[in-house]
Image: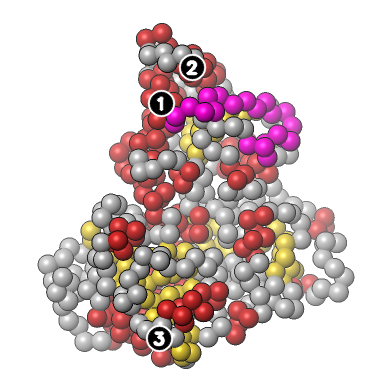
Amino acid sequence: MHLTPIDPSSTSSSAPANVPASSVTRDWICPFCPLLCDDLVVESREDDTLAVLNTECPRLAQALACYGKPDAQCSNSVDGHDADLDTALTSAARILSSAHRPLFGALTTDVAGARELYTLAAGCGAILDHLHGDAMSATTLALQDRGSFFTTLSEVRSRADLLVFFGCQPSQRYPRFFARTLEGTPHKRELVFVGCAPDPAASGLATTRIEALLPDADPFDILALWSALSEGRAPRALRDDGTGAAEALAALQARIAAAHYTVLVYEPATLPGPHAALLIEALNRIVKAANRTVRAGCLALGGDDGALSVNQTVTWLAGLPLRTRVCAPARVAGTAPLDYDPYRYRTARLLAKGEIDALLWVASFAPPAWPQALDPNVPAIVLGHPALAEAAKARGGATVFIPVATPGIDSGGHLFRVDSSVVMPLSAARGAALPSVATIASQLAARLNAQPAKQVQP
């Protein structure tokens, strides 16, 4: 799906004349942000660096700077020493087969990687949590407790006339948000930023009126008042703290009632913790109340680094979302095949309490290192960006490192877009000879299955 299609003839002159046609990929989909922009022209150069030719996005530029010629020469390592792939896989399988309580963390991969990791996790009784697990779990908890009305980028672009941004400036994390949703459309729109200042990136939009509402107010106070007003409470019946918040929010509620289609935009990762789920519940409640008489929907900006894709995939396979322990019934004595707990299976908590005895760290999109809180005596397997190779060697004993391809850079793949209803197919922008996460996870699972079956005592 192309939200802002480009004319190939308009970009053909963007590539230098001495660049072979095969080194330029048009309509490339960027995997480094959940917007999954699909209108890009990317050039793969002789030194294996990459450059986008037809737009500027600081987040994409920062990500592409992590790729270069050394990637293809990156080697596997075991206990701080270079090793061939067979040795690395053997060592990794040995760690997982002897672990009582392994954690699969980070999980920055695509749908295929998540599917194979789930199978591997079931074979060794692993807990699954994502790098952005806190934000993802807050959204999931709100959905479980209250349900939600969600919308898509296409609906925002074609129908929304009132956009309410709660406590967020989208371009700070997603630089092309306004270009992908509003830019170049003729519709008149109103943009209201509640609990924050307006996003400077929105100032250049045509036929758009922008304002800020209660920019310095506490988000919990705002939503307490707004929720009451959305259910029909009169402003005069609510406590007035002297700020005029009730009247201002009542006026906003009246605008929602008069709008053709309202979209309420928020970013789970920027909401104040540890009770972000309560704020998301309130936002969903406001949108549901609006839908009794008009059309409205929520757009949660999140799911970075494959978080949404992995969560969707695990939910398909298990019936439960991330922060679930999956286990083949015969693997761990006395343990249920599935155990979902968004609090107990939080990576930071598991590490702080010393409750894991092995870590599989999957970091294929960007090179986030494993948490410093990881006990140096806990064995670690890293399926990661080549930039993590030296850190893995430096960790020394009981550490296996296997470099893997980034989907959309050195392998194909599929990712869910930010609006959770569209799956985008990725194509490789270059071709460094690195295996995918799915390939390595599948080979590890095969090695575990080949070992004699035994029960591990919990």
Q: Position of residue 428 (x, y in %)?
A: 62, 70
* Residue type, numbered disc 3: Asp
Could you say whether the residue bearing mark 2 is in a helix, strand or loop? loop
The residue to which callout 3 is attached is: 79
Q: Label 1 amino acid?
A: Asp
Residue at the spot 35% in from the left edge and 68% down from the top edge: 374
Distance (Cα) linking label 1 and label 2:
12 Å
Boundaries of the magenta span: 199-219
CB under 8 Å between callouts 1 and 2?
Answer: no
- Quadrant position of residue 86: bottom left
Mark 1 = which residue?
A: 221
Q: Is residue 412 left or right of residue 309?
A: right
- What amino acid is labelled 2 in the image? Thr
Residue sitting nearer the eye, 412 or 214: 214
Q: Is residue 346 visible?
A: yes
Residue 367 x/y as whole percent: 52, 68
33 is higher (above) or lower (below) than 254: below
